[in-house]
Image (cartoon, rainbow, N blue to C red):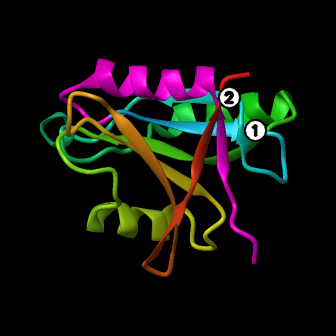
Amino acid sequence: MPEETLTLTAAVYEAMISLALGETPDEACGLFAGPPGGLVVDTFFPIANVAPPERRPEIYKLDGRGMLDAETAADEAGRAVLGVMHSHTHTVAYPSPTDVADAADADPFGTLVFVIVSLEHPDPYLRAFRILDGDITDVPVAVDPG
């Protein structure tokens, strides 16, 4: 199988980083979308983190209504939801055991890409992964300045 690359538009990349910084100290989250059948991301939907307030610095839970609205908007625009973004406010951009368990519930077939923005260092960075049956696979990320 050829290596796949998740390509983010510069606007989507900046929106993800900006949301993560803006929601600190809480984890930020959202869905991202692009043309069906590929991994080009041109749309980002910030979604409220509805985890219990005292847990938001450590975990996220996507608001169900926000997810439905994002999926509807993506569909109406001819886009497909390709994955989930969330931030780690003080750890590396790598799935935690909670992230892996949540991925198994949300995406049992491993079709989504999970983007994690790390705010561990002064310069935020992100990484992408597929998670299937507890196995974590890196997905290279490119930013299209275009």
Callouts 2 and 1 close, C-beta under 8 Å = yes
**x and y, in percent, of residue 132 in the image:** 53, 75
Residue drawn at x 29%, y 29% as measured from the top left:
123
Residue drawn at x 26%, y 51% as measured from the top left:
92
Give the residues in magenta: 1-27
For disc 2, the marked residue is 43
Q: Earlier in the sequence, mark 2 or mark 1?
A: 1
Is residue 74 shown above or below 80? Answer: above
Q: Which residue type carries mark 1? A: Gly
Q: Magenta segment: does it hold 25?
A: yes
For disc 1, the marked residue is 34
Residue drawn at x 60%, y 29% as measured from the top left:
44
Direction from residue 135 to residue 13 in the image, left or right: right
Q: Which residue type carries mark 2? A: Thr
Direction from residue 52 to residue 142 in the image, left or right: right
Q: Is mark 2 on a helix, strand or loop?
A: strand
- Camera-side residue: 62 or 90? 90
Q: Residues within 10 Å of mark 1 (few under 14, many from 20)?
A: many
Q: Quadrant of residue 51?
A: top left
Q: Residues within 10 Å of mark 2 (few under 14, many from 20)?
A: many
Q: Magenta segment: does it hold 93?
A: no
Quarter of the image with the C terminus is top right
**x and y, in percent, of residue 107 in the image:** 57, 65
Is residue 99 shown above or below 137? Answer: above
Q: Quadrant of residue 66?
A: top right
Is residue 108 shown above or below 92? Answer: below
Residue farthest to the left, as pictured = 54
Q: How far apart are marks 2 and 1 (CA)?
A: 6 Å
**x and y, in percent, of residue 22 in the image:** 31, 18
Q: Is mark 1 on a helix, strand or loop?
A: strand
Direction from residue 26 to residue 39 in the image, left or right: right
Quarter of the image with the N terminus is bottom right
